[in-house]
Image (cartoon, rainbow, N blue to C red):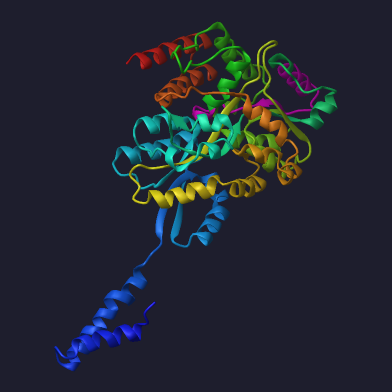
Amino acid sequence: MIKISQFFQSIQNFLKPKIPRFLALILSTLAILHFIILPAFTQQPVTVRVLMQALEANQWQPLEEKFEEENPDINLEIIEGPNDTNLVEDLYTSAFLLGDSPYDLVYMDIVWVPKFAAAGWLEDLSDRVSPAELDKFLEGDVNGSMYEGGLYRMPFRSDGGMLYYRTDLLEAGGYDPPETFSELMQISQELKEQDIADWGYVWQGKQYEGLAAMFVEILKGHGAFWVNPDTLEVGLDSPEAIDAVKFLKSTINEGISPPGVTTYAEEETRRIFQNDDVVFLRNWPYVFALAQESEISGQFAIKPMVHEPGEPSGACQGGWGLGISKSSQHPDEAWRVAKFISSRETQKQYILKTGYVPSRKSLFNDPEVVEKYSHYPQLLEVVENAALRPPIAQYAQASDILQRYLSAALTGTMTPEEAMNTAAQETRNLFAS
Ligand code: GLC
C-alpha cells in the first residue's frame, strides 16, 4: 500500500519540470482529494433491503446485528410491514408491478412462491445451492420453494398448524386430550357448563390467509380437499367439505368459540388463550415459547389436530424463506444474507430464542434445542405430515375466493351449502379463464 505523502511527492516530481511550483502544489492536492480522500469517505456499505411482518422484524434484530458485524460491507435494512401475511404479499406484489422493486430480498411465505416465480420476479437460486445442501432441509419446505424445477427461496423457518390444550383444565374435568371433532366439542361444552372454562375452542376466523390455512386442516380431518394441484379439480362443494364448514360454524352457534372468533388472526387467539381459561387453541408453533412465558406457563401441551373417526389429522404446511428479487442491483450481497439466515447456526440461535420451527432437519433433535423445547422431536412428525394449500400460480386468487365465501358462511350471510357451492364454482371459473 502506498502512503499519501509518497503519492503527493511523486505527483509533484512528475509535474515540477512541466509547470510552476505553486500550480504543481494545487494540482497534487486536488489529485489526493480526488483519488484518496473522497473515495475513503464515500465508500458506503451496500444496502440490502427486505420487508417482513412487524412481529418478525423485531425478532430479526439480533440476526441483523450479527450479520452486519460479520459483513461490514453490507447494510441489511429490515422494513416492517403489517402482520397479516397476505397484506405483506400485497406490498411486495405492488412493488414488483410498479417496476423495479425496492426490496433486494423477498421474505416469502411458502404460498407466495409459485405466483412470484411464475411472474418472473425472483432469481432462480438452483446454481447457488448444491443438492446435498438442500437435502438437509425438510422436504416440504424445499418442495414449497420450487416452481417448475427452479429453486426460488432458501427455507428459513418451517411451520405447521397444531392443537394447543390446557392440561390443567382437562385434568380438572377428568378428560384425556380429544382425538375427534365431536370429542373436542363435548369436552368444551362440559367444561364450560361446569364453569371450569370460559371458552372451549379459539381459532383464526378472520377473512385473511390464516383462515384458509386453518381451514385446510379441518378439510383434511373431514376427508375433504380444496384443490388438487395436479388436476386442478376443486373439492369445496363436496358433502365432506360442507360438513367441515358446518363444524366451524357449530363452534360459534353452540358458544364453544367466542362470537368474535370471526375477526381473530393468530395474535388475537394467542392472547385470549393466554389470558382467559380457554381449553383448545388452533395455532402455529411460535405460540409455544410465548405462552411458556405467560400465566399459563407449564399448563398447556400440543397435539396434532383433531379429525373425524377414520380420517387423518391435518397440519397446514406453512413456513418462510428468502428469495432474491430479479430487479436487485445487489444479488450477490442479497445471497450472502440468504446464506447466513438459512445457515444451521443462525436457525438454531433464532429458534432457541423464539420457539419457531427450523427448516433444517437436524435441529429437531439437537440436544440444546430439545433441552429447551422437549416437544420438538414430536413436532418433526407434525410438520412432516403436512396438509398443503395448493401450490399453484393462481393461489392468491383461489385463496381470496375461499376466504370470502368461508367468511360469509361463518358470519351467517350465506348458508354453508350456498357459500361452498359458489366458492367451488368461482374457483373452477378461475382455472378455466
Ligand atoms: C404462518 C404460516 C404461513 C401462513 C400464515 C397464515 O405465518 O407460516 O405459511 O400463510 O401463518 O396466517
Which residue appears at 21% of the width and 86% of the height?
14
Image spot of residue 311 (x, y percent): 66, 12
Q: Quadrant of residue 256?
A: top right
Would residue 164 be found to the left or right of residue 212 on screen? right
Q: Position of residue 18 (x, y in %)?
A: 14, 88
Q: Where 73 sits versus 140, above or below?
A: below
Q: Residue at x 38, y 38 (%)?
A: 122
- Residue farthest bottom in this picture: 21
Q: Is residue 129 above or below residue 28?
A: above
Residue depicted at 59% across the width and 14% down the height: 244
Q: Quadrant of the C terminus?
A: top left
Which residue appears at 73% of the width and 35% of the height? 375
Question: Is 258 placed left or right of 27 in the picture?
Answer: right
Residue located farthest toward the top when viewing the structure as drawn: 239
Q: Which residues are magenta?
A: 184-210
- The answer to whether residue 271 is visible is no
The percent coordinates of residue 300 (x first, y second) are 76, 34
Tag count in the figure?
Answer: 0
> Is 201 in the magenta?
yes
In the image, taking residue 361 as reference, residue 94 lies left or right, namely left
x, y percentage for residue 361? Answer: 63, 36
Seen in the picture, residue 181 relative to 209 is either above or below; the reply is above
Q: Is residue 281 above or below residue 122?
A: above
Q: Is residue 198 left or right of residue 6?
A: right
Image quarter of residue 313: top right
- The N terminus, quarter of image: bottom left
Q: Is residue 214 magenta?
A: no
Would you say residue 24 is visible in this rendering? yes
